Structure formats: C-alpha cells, structure tokens
Image (cartoon, rainbow, N blue to C red):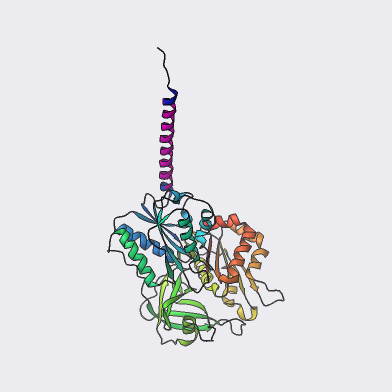
Amino acid sequence: MTLTIDPVRLGGALALSSGYLAMCLAIWRARAIRRSLPAGDADWLVVYASQTGSAEYLAGRTADTLNTGGLSARAVCMSDLPAGALAQAGRVLFIASTYGEGDAPDTAARFAGETMSASADLAQLHYAVLALGDSSYTNYCGFGRALDGWLAAHGATPLFDRIDVDRGNADALAAWQHHIGRLAGTADAPDWEAPGYGEWRILERELLNAGSAGAPLYRIALAPCAGALPAWEAGDLAQVSAPGDPEHPREYSIASLPSEGRLELMVRLQRREDGSLGAASGWLCETASSEDVIRLRLRAHQRFRLNGNAARGLIAIGNGSGLAGLRALIKARIDAGNGDNWLLFGERNAACDFLRRDELQGWLAGGGLAQLDLAFSRDQATPRYVQHLVREHAQELRSWVEEGAAIYVCGSLQGMAGGVHEALAEVLGAGKLDVLTAEGRYRRDVY
C-alpha cells in the first residue's frame, strides 16, 4: 500500500501546528512573566515610583481599595518590574513621584532610561497615572506626565485622565480615591487619611553656625506636650504644619533616635524675596516659644532607613542640613556596636560651619566613625565641595563598596546631589551605581 501525502494539506497542517505552538509559547511567556512579578497572579498591578515614600504609601492604599472590592491587586515598586512585564499586563495603575526638576525618582531611573526609551506594543494595557509633584518646580509632575505620554504613545488606553497632585493636595487625592472606588465597585474603602498631627513643644533651640556667610541653621529639640515619645527609625521624617500655611506641611529629616529622649531637627532659616520669614522655618527657628504648640507628625521613610543595610558598612555623604538624616543613621549604627561608618561632609567655612563638631570628633576618637572627611568650600581660593572628596578618595570608596558598604546621600538637591552622583558614577562606574540602587545600597534623601 502506498501512502500519498497531499502537499496542500501538509502545508495547512504545519501552519496550524506552528500557530498552535506559537500560541502556546505566547501563553507560556505571559504566565512566566506574571509568575516572575512581585505581584504574583494579581489582576491589577499598582506600580509606584517613590523617592521619599509618599507614592509607596498611596500605592498600598490603592491596592487595599481594589482588594476590598473583591479584585486581586498588588503594589509593586517600579524597580522590581521585570523587562517585558507591561507588554503582558492588562490593568496597571501608576503612582509616580517627580524628583528634582522633572526627573524620575531613583527607584524608577532604570525604567525611565531603558524601558521608556524603547519601543513597545501596549495596545492590551489599560492604565491610569497619579502624578505627585510640587508646582514650585519648573517641570511640575514631570516624570508622571512623561510616563503618561509614553504609555499613550505606545497604544495603552487610559482608564481616566491623569491626576496631578501638588504637594499632597487633598482634593486631587480624593479624586484619585473616587476613581479607584468606582473601579473596585465599592464605597467601603480603607481610610486614606494621613495620621493626625500631634502637639509638641520646643525644648531647646541652638544656632549651629553663628557668623556663617550662609543662612542660620538651628538645632531644634522637641518633645510631645503629653505622653511618651512615639517610635521612629533613623532615616524617618517629621512633618510640621506651620500656623501661617497649614495646608502644605514641611518635611525635615529627623536627626535623633527615640532612645535619646527627644526629637531633633536641623532647620535652615528661610526668607522669602521680600525678606519675610519662611512659614515653617521662621516659626521653628524664631517665632515659636517653648509655650507654643508645634503641630508635628512622623512619617516613615522606608527608602532611607537602614533596613537590610544595618549590618553593612556605611558611607554617609552630604552637606548642610543633610547632616541631620546622616547623623541619625550613624548614631543608630554606633548604638548597635558598628563602627565602620565613614562620613564625607561639606559646608562653607570650617570656623563657622563645622556643624556638630564636638560630637563628630568625639565619635571619630572613640571609634564610632572610622573616617571623617570634610570639604569647606570657602576656605581656599578654589571652591572645594563634597563631590571633590568622593574623587579624592576613589580607591578607598571602591574598596568599601567591594566589601559590601552601602552609600547614603542627604542634603541639597541643587549642586550637591547631582555633583555627588556624577562623582560616584566616575569612581564606581554608572553600571555599578545602577546595581547598588537596585540592591538598595545606594539611597538618597535630597531636597
């Protein structure tokens, strides 16, 4: 018996088989990506890009609301999204902070640089964007707006118009919560309200830089008017509501630990163009007396806590009032018995601006600091800044990082933060700095 094969039927069968295999492969790839996501098998992803924790907090509340309505939702940091995840996702809510003059937060730098610079087919994706920003900056909500534009340009369909939030504006956040409630089909949403302000009073106020060419910088110690100190960790922030502008709280790095029996801030006195005092800094530094009530609440700053870096060596880099956040981190490690702490710090003049001189020199002499390097920009003909210290100590810095140290940067956004970042990229390599960021070993609190 002779078997005759019809070439037309054979071609059709092969095409059908190939199509089926391709379909199986596509399904397998989609499931593999979903399994690889931190969100597991959630139907909704809430992707956040956070610098100081606000976007992360709102992402958690958003996911809670969706879950309350019976949907499956998970909050995911943008840095944890694997390549190709958006091409397979169906419904994603983005909560994106803007850092500096329109830049992506550190946790979203790789996404902005790689994913958003590549072409992608996102026709299957339905999304919404909550953009967090500050209208006093030129490129207000710059990253959130760029993200929204990129998603739309690549075929994604918005569930509703982007919502921009100016310095935590309550009406804008209420609009976002309203939309999320409608998506979830429930009015029984978790409480999104921020913790209420407590009543505090000033215990001490000390001018740290008498005679400085710069604006006055004060150490301010506070305690609750009633009750015990609340708990916080090194790296956390204090929000102060000033009587003259109660709608937009000012955030300050906490310089102390609860074990010290007080909450300390380092506040730079600000003046407006007309010479009047800044609403919050003027209240804290000059106007408020020990009898006045200071409305203050604490906010966890997960991105600047020690967390998994508690046992690592610490390279602390900063300037000016940024010493507050770095001081708390170093003190926490000293109290835990860890002396492998290296502080690189910059200010104007050694005579007036060597902030907390006695304490830092005491830590160095007692082994709490392994190394202390200082740059005072006005003490020589050519200005010398903290980023110069990074380059001058390149070999030591590489050695510390190779041995597992983490890098924390705190201080001014303008000048210092960018200069230090560029210097670190030169010394360590841009790729290595990206890896440290992804590992949580390079963290910044700049403003």
Apparent side of residue 172 relative to residue 189 in the rendered image (left or right): right
Q: Residue 49 at x, y = what percent?
A: 46, 61
Instruction: Farthest residue to the front: give it.
Output: 8
> Can residue 370 be seen here?
no
Question: Looking at the picture, does residue 92 appear above or below residue 386?
Answer: above
| Residue drawn at 41 percent across, 48 percent down | 34
The majority secondary structure of the magenta stretch comes to helix
Q: Position of residue 32 (x, y in %)?
A: 43, 44
| Residue drawn at 49 percent across, 77 percent down | 265
For image coordinates 48% across by 60% down, the residue present is 149
Q: Is residue 58 visible?
A: yes
Span shown in magenta? 9-33
Q: Position of residue 332 (x, y in %)?
A: 49, 67
Q: Is residue 209 left or right of residue 52?
A: right
Tell me where residue 85 appears, x and y as whole percent: 45, 50
The N terminus appears in which quarter of the rendering? top left
Residue 15: within the magenta? yes
Residue 340 among magenta residues:
no
Q: Quadrant of residue 297?
A: bottom left
- Write the residue at 28% across / 61% down: 186
- Of all residues, the one furthest to the right in this rendering is 381
